[in-house]
Image (spheres, helix red, strand yellow):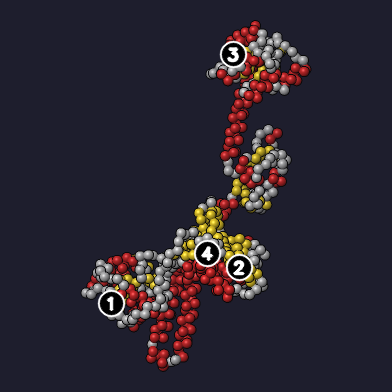
């Protein structure tokens, strides 16, 4: 065990010698002996640090023992025991102000001296351990991200860790009521509450409270931990919304698939009837009826396209476009959509607003948002469409997810209409949810949400009842505009042919329509509803097929794989893929989405066969 080191400050040599011998015999180590305060402080740092200083109050030097003790405490924090021949009241009062660990009157009793020294050293050890525990306490609480507040039984704050000031802001809040510093709007069980921080943000805090155990003095003292769960609750909500939208997407994709197959058959038969000159001449009244069916079918096609915005198989052809140009081109349409009592203001930034998105879908987003704003305004009002380029320096959490740092083109559509109640804001992007009292089908905002999600964009909403609504859209800014693909206008060339075509389509009615369209164009057509049968036909056939028309998603095999396997038997085979919907695939040179116009289908067939 290491010996305790004691420094002696005594100007009487015989006393200092007696003290040194006594302490050494008792097992202590003498650090050094000083005869004055001048000797004590001369090169103090060069000597080993003592555990205790035994000092006479009346010593020689510039400072007496009392002043020397104060200086030692301030500079080195080394405990002191006083030795003195004086015990008057004034000397004792001065000594008490020097915070001594003992006070020994000369002539001293050796046994009592050793007891006082040992007790002082024991107190010093206890204080060191207490300081270590306090340092551990402070460092632990300082490292906790949650707010930790200690209150007495009267609910008065006695301690707050640094994380607490993230909520309250800087300042000294000790000795103030907890409820005054943290005016929480508690939930029913008081384990959670809303708090407006010093920046004005509403935070949801989870409250955990425990009471200190110990003596009667500590009874009622509580430790409260306030955890900011605002982000956690937001992410949980986003996860639920994501799962819900994913489920809706699967449902919408399935419904649209079957519905589009039905529309393909309906539109196909309408076209075949209209192309039947003999029938039209015999029954002229049929033409208007059939065209009515066609027009209704086209409206149904638009509905299925809206449903497909929630499906992973949505068709979209993104390219770099100038957003400002899109808005300028739509301005006339907006003017016709918005009544005269509603002012339409368009404020476009002068910076380049290049984003990557399907331009048709961007138009669909803007039109739906303007319609939503128009319907929210009763009587007169104002709609504002604006763009700006913004720099996001740190990740930001929006309603559609986490917005990473970067440069974005921001589009805002703002109105001063009735606003959206807070309790239904989480539902407005859901399909078929409408706030228009049965006047809408509830696909406008959900279509916007679906397109933005698939296009890599983000959307945020700010609204309150009576204060209007603002939709903010964010798209990553691109460097330059690039042209899109041709819009596939009807070719002027003759679309008749005599090539051999293999049609593979599991839906009997859709397959029969495609076969009739192709045979009307003089093609030699073979058809089947099964991929396996298609491979057998190719294997047994003497002459290879010139063209394969297949659904992109066949049972047990993809249309692409089927095309590759048939190409073994027909090396020069060309392929047209069909589907109710699909994600854009650059490898598919020839694709047509169901439901399709028969004329468009026959033009694509001719174009594909004539391509290199």
Q: Crowding near pointer 2: few (<14 within 10 Å), some, many (20+)?
A: some
Q: Is tag 1's residue or tag 2's residue first in the polypeptide sequence?
A: 2
Of residue 568 and residue 349, the one placed in the foreground of this image is 349
Pointer 4 residue:
449
The mark that comes first in sequence, 3 or 4, is 3
Contact (Cβ within 8 Å) of mark 1 with mark 3:
no
The residue that disc 1 covers is 500
Q: Is 457 placed above or below 174 here?
A: below
Of labels 1 and 3, earlier in sequence is 3
Give the image quarter of residue 574. bottom left
3D distance between C-alphas at marks 1 and 2: 58 Å
Q: Secondary structure at mark 3?
A: strand
Marks 2 and 4, how far apart in space? 24 Å
Q: Residues within 10 Å of mark 1 (few under 14, many from 20)?
A: some
**Residue corresponding to mark 3:** 32
- Mark 2 falls on what kind of element? strand
- Residue hosting label 2: 345
Q: Position of residue 79 (x, y in %)?
A: 64, 21
């Amino acid at each position: 065990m290491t010996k305790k080191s004691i420094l002696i400050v005594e100007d009487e040599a015989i006393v200092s010698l007696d003290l040194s011998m006594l302490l050494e015999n008792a097992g202590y180590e003498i650090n050094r002996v000083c005869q004055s305060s001048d000797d004590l402080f001369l090169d103090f740092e060069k000597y080993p640090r003592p555990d205790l200083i035994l000092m006479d109050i009346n010593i020689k030097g510039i400072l007496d023992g009392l002043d020397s003790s104060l200086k030692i405490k301030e500079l080195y924090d080394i405990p002191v025991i006083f030795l003195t021949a004086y015990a008057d009241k004034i000397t004792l009062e001065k000594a008490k102000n020097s915070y001594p660990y003992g006070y020994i009157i000369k002539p001293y009793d050796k046994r009592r001296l050793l007891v006082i020294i040992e007790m002082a050293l024991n107190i010093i050890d206890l204080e060191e351990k207490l300081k270590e525990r306090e340092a551990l306490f402070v460092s632990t609480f300082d490292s906790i991200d949650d707010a930790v507040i200690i209150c007495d039984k009267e609910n008065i704050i006695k301690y707050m860790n640094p994380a607490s000031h993230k909520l309250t802001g800087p300042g000294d809040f000790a000795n103030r009521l907890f409820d005054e510093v943290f005016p929480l709007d508690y939930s029913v069980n008081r384990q959670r509450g809303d708090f407006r921080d010093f920046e004005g943000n509403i935070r949801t805090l989870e409250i955990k409270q425990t009471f200190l155990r110990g003596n009667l003095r500590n009874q009622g003292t509580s430790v409260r931990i306030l955890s900011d769960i605002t982000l956690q609750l937001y992410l949980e909500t986003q996860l639920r919304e994501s799962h819900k939208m994913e489920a809706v997407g699967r449902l919408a994709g399935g419904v649209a698939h079957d519905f589009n197959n039905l529309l393909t058959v309906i539109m196909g038969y309408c076209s075949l009837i209209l192309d039947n000159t003999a029938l039209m001449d015999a029954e002229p009244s049929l033409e208007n009826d059939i065209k009515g069916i066609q027009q209704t079918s086209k409206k149904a096609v638009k509905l299925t396209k809206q449903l497909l915005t929630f499906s992973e198989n949505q068709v979209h052809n993104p390219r770099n476009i100038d957003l400002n140009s899109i808005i300028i081109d739509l301005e006339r349409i907006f003017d016709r959509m918005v009544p005269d009592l509603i002012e339409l203001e368009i404020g476009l930034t002068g910076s380049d607003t290049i984003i990557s998105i399907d331009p048709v879908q961007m138009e669909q987003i803007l039109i739906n948002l303007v319609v939503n704003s128009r319907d929210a305004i009763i009587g007169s009002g104002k709609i504002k469409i604006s763009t700006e380029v913004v720099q996001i320096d740190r990740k930001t959490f929006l309603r559609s997810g986490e917005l990473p740092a970067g440069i974005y083109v921001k589009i805002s559509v703002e109105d001063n209409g009735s606003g959206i109640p807070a309790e239904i804001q989480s539902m407005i992007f859901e399909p078929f949810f409408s706030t228009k009292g049965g006047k809408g089908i509830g696909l406008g905002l959900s279509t916007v949400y679906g397109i933005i999600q698939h296009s890599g964009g983000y959307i945020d909403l700010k609204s309150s009842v009576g204060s209007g609504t603002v939709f903010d859209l964010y798209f990553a800014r691109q460097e330059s505009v690039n042209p899109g693909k041709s819009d596939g206008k009807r070719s002027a060339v003759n679309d008749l042919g005599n090539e051999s075509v293999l049609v593979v389509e599991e839906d009997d009615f859709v397959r029969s329509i495609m076969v009739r369209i192709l045979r009307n164009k003089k093609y030699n057509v073979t058809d089947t509803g099964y991929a396996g049968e298609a491979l057998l036909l190719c294997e047994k056939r003497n002459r290879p097929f010139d063209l394969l028309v297949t659904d992109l998603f066949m049972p047990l095999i993809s249309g692409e794989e089927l095309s590759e396997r048939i190409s073994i038997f027909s090396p020069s085979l060309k392929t047209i893929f069909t589907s109710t919907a699909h994600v854009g695939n650059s490898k598919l040179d020839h694709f047509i989405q169901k439901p399709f116009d028969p004329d468009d289908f026959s033009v694509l067939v001719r174009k594909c066969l004539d391509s290199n």
